Amino acid sequence: MDELAEDLELLPSTRRALRHRIAVAQSEGRAPSVVAAVLRGGEVLWEGSRTSVEGHGPDGDVQYRIGSITKTFTAVLVMRLRDEGLISLADPLEKHLPGTAAGQVTIAQLLSHTSGLAAETPGEWWERTPGERRPELGDVLGEEPFKLTPGTRHHYSNPGYTLLGSLVEAVRGRSWEEALRTEVLEPLGLERTSGEPQAPHAGGWAVHPWADVMMPEPLEDLGLMAAAGRLWSTTRDLARFAAFLLRGDERVLCAESVREMRTAASPPEPGLAEHGYGLGLQLAAVGGRKLVGHSGSLPGFVAGLWLSEADDLAAVVLANCTSGLPASTVAADLVGIVADAEPRFPRPWRPFLESDHVPLELCGPWYWGTSPQVVRLTADGLLELGPVGVSGRTARFRAEPDGSWTGLSGYYAGETLRAVRRADGSVSHLDLASFVFTREPYDADAPVPGGVDPQGWRGIG
């Protein structure tokens, strides 16, 4: 058996640790039921559940309400509009959805929760009241929709994602749910994800905080708020969705676009330095591991989905209780259990093909002033630039048709790296965002800004 195949099989001790974690979660969280799944390499490698009903447990095909994980699906729809050239993330909402009280905010601000809009709708608790009480966007936004100046800080906003759902409808000319079904759910094979519950599905329960009794939660049609939290799904469907968020799928969104969704787009909320937000995805640092995903809750249900790109792992946890079981924390723990117990096998090293263009003249050591830097060419054809022996600015660059390279990450994201050549065609230096990188520290033969002392390097006289 090769290593990649082994990577999809868990040791009995790891399986027991996963079972134990959800057993503790169900017991201490006092949840009627909990179901979980772990995915690696695009495949589900473990499923488990615990329930208060003896002899019966849900499986990966039972629907639960997923709350705000719905927002990630809505963000995918918006990114599709962007990729098709129908909108720009920098567009003000008014350009495509006129007549709201939030027309000046940009689509990017809505996606990243930096619009300054209120966290919730005015009036009664929208999650436990019929959507018909908020028939218009004006009812969702209220008379004073803004709590903060747009673009100044992260502030989670459910009404903001309602606006994005209405944006999708305005641009597509069909309902948010129909667009979601035909553009995302069907292409990805998410047959058990829907706006209305489909049997088999769990019932939502409220568990008394001080007594072991419970009552059913009402099931409301969220109306316009659907794009912020309506969906029902299963652990198997969400595992497939997590695989898409890791790799992309050309039928829905390319790998570069889902990578953009996973990239921080707004600073963390004050006091939560380990958390941030991308475009429809939450970012977190847990146990030294970078996680991307989303939590979700609606009365009667809690949900958590996290993925670790570095470990090629994802975990989903769903439970049918209003509070008590920290589904998002448990999902992060499941990722950590597998990643720590069974580290991912690296892919075999392979050289480039003879037919590949390998720009060796750019590789190796360079100097930014006196700071040693190194350029490496990775197997995926990207350039990596970073300091030698110390922490500092690192970035990856994608090749462009004109011979330049575009920054994909870090301080140099979006910046252009160019190799400046001499008359004979050899590389003189690298130019990056006004910085000159030379083969020797302050190379006198390169156009170093400010010039180089004509006496060169010397000791103390």
Image: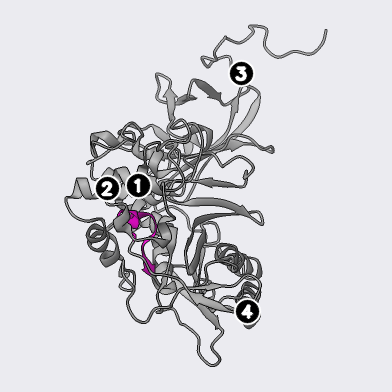
Q: Quadrant of residue 438?
A: top right
Query: Residue under circle 4?
Result: 212
User: Which one is in front in this view, the residue at disc 1 or the one at disc 3?
Assistant: 1
Task: Write the start and end of the magenta stretch as one range.
Answer: 222-232
Q: CA distance from mark 3 to mark 2?
A: 64 Å
Element assignment for label 3: loop
Q: In the orientation shown, which residue stands out farthest toward the right?
A: 461
Residue type, label 4: Asp
For marks 3 and 2, the one nearer the N-term is: 2
Q: CA distance from mark 4 to mark 2?
A: 40 Å
Question: Are circles 4 and 1 on residues that touch, CB within 8 Å?
Answer: no
Q: CA distance from mark 1 to mark 3?
A: 60 Å
Badge 1: few (under 14), some or many (20 or more) residues near its Cα, within 10 Å? Answer: many
Residue 231, magenta (yes or no): yes
Q: Secondary structure of the magenta portion, mostly? A: helix
Element assignment for label 1: helix
Question: Are circles 1 and 2 on residues that touch, CB within 8 Å?
Answer: yes
- The structure residue drawn at horizontal position 38% and vertical position 47%, both measured from the top left corner, is 159
Q: Is residue 247 visible?
A: no
Q: CA distance from mark 4 to mark 1?
A: 36 Å
Query: Residue under circle 1?
Result: 140
**Residue 255: x and y, percent?**
37, 52
Query: Residue under circle 3?
Result: 442
Residue type, label 1: Val
Give the number of the disc on residue 136: 2
Tell me which colouring the rendered structure shows.
Answer: one colour
